[in-house]
Structures are given as C-alpha cells and as structure tokens.
Image (cartoon, rainbow, N blue to C red):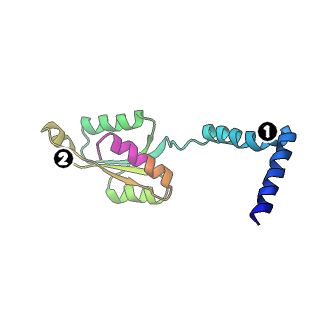
Amino acid sequence: MWKRLKALLYKEFIQMRRDRLTFAIMIGMPIIQLMIFGFAINTEVKHLPTVVYDQSRSMQSRALLQEFTASGYFDIVAYSNSLSDMQKDIDRSYAKVGFYFPPDYATLIYNGKNAKIEMLVDASDSMSASSAISTAVGKHLI
C-alpha cells in the first residue's frame, strides 16, 4: 500500500512540475487568500453604544467619560437615572456597554484613594464585549 501511495505522489509531483499553471495555483492561491483575509478581517470593535448612570456628577466622572469617548471605542447614547434603567437599555440592545459611577467617586479621587466604576456589558456579542472590557481594563479604571 505504501508503495502505491509513494508512486502516486511521485507521479503527481512530476505532473505539477510539467504544468506550471497548476503549480502556481496550488502555491499562489493560499498565499493570496492569507494576505487578503489578513488585511480584510479586522477584529477591532469601535463606537460601542454606551449608557451612563453617573451618581457622582462630578468633574472627574465627566473627564473620564470624555476620555472614554475620545478613545473612539465608546459612544454615549443615553444617561440613565437608575441601575435598573441602565440594565434595561442593555437588555433591549439599545446599548452594548453601561458605566456606573458611584456617588463617592470624586471624593475618593480627591482623597487619593482608588476609585472604581462599574461596567455592564452585553455579552451576546463576545467580540464587542471583550473589546469593551479590554479597553476599560487597559485604562486601569474597572
């Protein structure tokens, strides 16, 4: 059986050497596809619709929101009046991300303490969710 397979492979390689077009297609097409798909497929997710519930309503929270929107990853589409409203907006797919600023956010920053915000993410789209989380974590804020 191995002799037959060896003979068949040998015959096919001889045929490929004779027919340059077949050889070029066998080698060239996968390389071209890799190059095209490598440039065409972009996994970076930007402009995620974002809802904000800001209990702090301080200059520090507004500055952080400005930083998030300036990054190009988050677009604020609404401001909520409660956590449940923010959750509803995300559940209805009105927004993919939600930021919650606690009332003591500015006080903690002013006192030099570690101030954290909460982030709610719609995980139905894993690419958007992972992009949003990595962007926020990269800023060391969540």
Q: In this view, does 93 lie above or below 22?
A: below
Kindly identify the residue that appears in the image at 51 percent across and 42 percent down: 44
Mark in the foreground, 2 or 1: 1
- Residue 115 x/y as whole percent: 21, 44
Kindly identify the residue that appears in the image at 28 percent across and 39 percent down: 61
- Quadrant hosting residue 33: top right
Front residue (pair 33, 44) = 33
Q: Farthest residue to the bottom: give it.
A: 1
Tag of residue 9: none
Front residue (pair 131, 54) = 131
For the residue marked with disc 1, what is the amino acid? Ala
Quarter holding the N terminus is bottom right
Q: Main secondary structure of the magenta part?
A: helix
The residue wearing badge 1 is 24
Instruction: Characterize the local packing of mark 2: few (<14), some (14-19) or many (20 or more) Cα atoms within 10 angstroms.
Output: some
For the residue marked with disc 2, what is the amino acid? Asp
- Residue 72 x/y as whole percent: 45, 36
In three-dimensional space, the C-alpha distance between marks 2 and 1, rounded to whole angstroms, equals 66 Å
- Residue 70 x/y as whole percent: 41, 33
Give whichever of discs 2 and 1 has the lower sequence position: 1
Q: Farthest residue to the left: give it.
A: 111
Tag of residue 104: 2
**Left or right of 87 in this view: 58:** left
Can residue 53 be seen at all in this image of the molecule? yes
Q: Give the magenta part as a residue range.
A: 132-142
SS of the residue under disc 2 = loop
Q: Do the residues labelled 2 and 1 touch (CB within 8 Å)?
A: no
SS of the residue under disc 1 = helix
Instruction: Characterize the local packing of mark 1: few (<14), some (14-19) or many (20 or more) Cα atoms within 10 angstroms.
Output: few
**Left or right of 23 in this view: 72:** left
Kindly identify the residue that appears in the image at 31 percent across and 37 percent down: 64
